[in-house]
Image (spheres, rainbow, N blue to C red):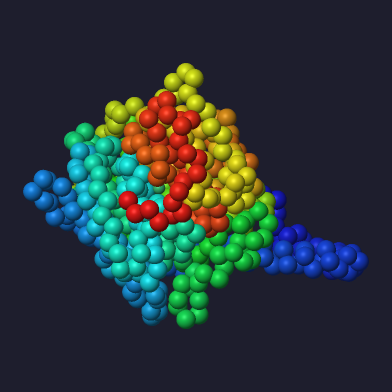
Amino acid sequence: MKTHPSPPRHFWRRRGLFGKLLLIGALALVPFGAFFGAVFTVAYQDARQSNLGELTFGNPVAVPPVLEPTVDAQGRKHFDLRLRTGRSELLPGHDTETWGVNGAHLGPTLRASTGDRVVMHVTNDLPEASTLHWHGMRLPARTDGGPHQEIAPGETWSPQWTIRQPGASLWYHPHPHGHTAEHVYRGVSGMFLLDDPESGRLDLPGEYGVDDVPLIIQDKRFDEDGELDFSRASSLAGGVGAGATGILGDEILVNGTHDPHFEVSRTLTRLRVLNASPARVYNLGFDDGRDFRVIGTDSGLLPVPAPRDRVVVSPGERVELVVRLAPGESPVLRSFPGGLGAGFPGDRFAGGDDTFDLIQLRAPAGIAPSPGVPAELSRGEPPEPRPGAPVRRFDLGGRSINGKKMDMSRVDEVVSAGATEVWEIRGGRNPHSFHIHDVAFRILDIGGEPPPSWLAGRKDTVYVPPGEEVRLVVEFGTDVDPEVPYMYHCHLLYHEDKGMMGQFVIVPPGREDSVPRTLRTGGHDHG
Ligand code: C2O
Ligand code: CU
Ligand code: CU
């Protein structure tokens, strides 16, 4: 799988004694070069991580409970969510401070259908201000839960909206300006599944927790006391070479469970994979090389299932897979090296050379046969660019977009309601993951090439390889508000927190030039 040049360790090993002495002599002539060379070599070797052979898959994976809403006289569904602190045994024998929603770590699965009117009651019992953002949801900006909808400690925020989009696997997480990485990393995240009648009629695995299972994948790093370690967020692993990515953990949790397995009960199992990690990109496949069907991505089902044996999933992205197991089989879902496209040495420092076993699937004897995967899934049309569609360009820098760092009071882009636009995202030196609020988009091309079929459906987040340009056809919502912006940003949360984020407002068509580009509010307007 290695496509980069041999790492320095191999180079060193291949030398004979004379060669080594010669090298040492040469290095002694350039002490500064030697020093930095040595630091680089150590850092480079240190940066590759793997858990292969360390797991026994002994723990049944936790399946987040579905939160039942209360339905009021008008038929609105009310969900009560409480952000709180707690302690969890994430690693055996270690008691770790964690944050969660309605519990000590992670949050319940929310579920609603197209056409539902939902009311959220989000109470912040954390020691600091936070927000709760509905990632992938099309909704009015003041209900979005971005950095402008801060919830002070002790306060309750109650946004409501109507679900007006197809079925999809969305999620929710905090979005406080400058602190998103920390709040998500501590454990405030959950799934928000949307259903629609059309996809409900398909013969897809759909029994929650039985043959339809969310897999929230997160990497963590623990210190000696078993507490979550934040110290690496911006230090060596984040600062060397091209790899300034933020926290890359060396332990993987699935739905908060370490060393997990899932026992399937039918031959087909649908896995709704969410990458809720702050920075890690996973190159997913099975250890025995079996293939699976990709049936959906961020914003809904694909038109037809796409057979794959690998999928690259960057932070914020979701992918729905259907995998077939015969009785007695126990394949392991693994993240393989490769897939980042950052080259040498960028791949190494961004986690692209890492290998992690994530979860083992176990099929006992006598599992029930499932019907096959339907040949056609979604008949919804992915966004199409109209002739003359507006084109916008976004250059991803180290910590900025188009040379500008996030400013809560600056409106970067003004979009007209219901517009379909072409957004051209230019990758930088590091891996990035580009996300736009309120929208669904389709990838036109990546580095000039049309995307593989599994990436050709409706999405809201896309991996942007270093140095590549990704072009998107973006379909915007129709909720106008010249005063409350939506966000677009890198979903590597360290990048987002450091300023790689911008704001757009949606206005009635024809009003683009008459809206203020400076917002009066500094970030405390409560929707
Ligand atoms: Cu997942 Cu701006 O968010
Ligand atoms: Cu979002
Ligand atoms: Cu980034």
Q: Is residue 69 visible?
A: yes
Q: Residue furthest top?
A: 387
Q: Is residue 444 above or below residue 432?
A: above
Q: Residue furthest left?
A: 73
Closer to us: 390 or 474: 390
Q: Is residue 126 above or below residue 525?
A: below
Say left or right for 185 vs 256. right
- Residue at x 75% of width, y 59% of height: 11
Q: Is residue 328 visible?
A: no
- Residue at x 45% of width, y 76% of height: 227
- Residue at x 36% of width, y 44% of height: 141
Asked which quadrant contains residue 166, the reply is: top left
Say left or right for 91 vs 406. left
Give residue 421's position: percent from left, percent from top: 46, 29
Give residue 184's position: percent from left, percent from top: 42, 61
Closer to us: 324 or 438: 438
Give residue 38's position: percent from left, percent from top: 76, 67
All told, the count of numbered labels is 0
- Residue at x 8% of width, y 48% of height: 73
Give residue 1's position: percent from left, percent from top: 58, 49
Say left or right for 85 vs 487. left
Closer to us: 90 or 267: 90
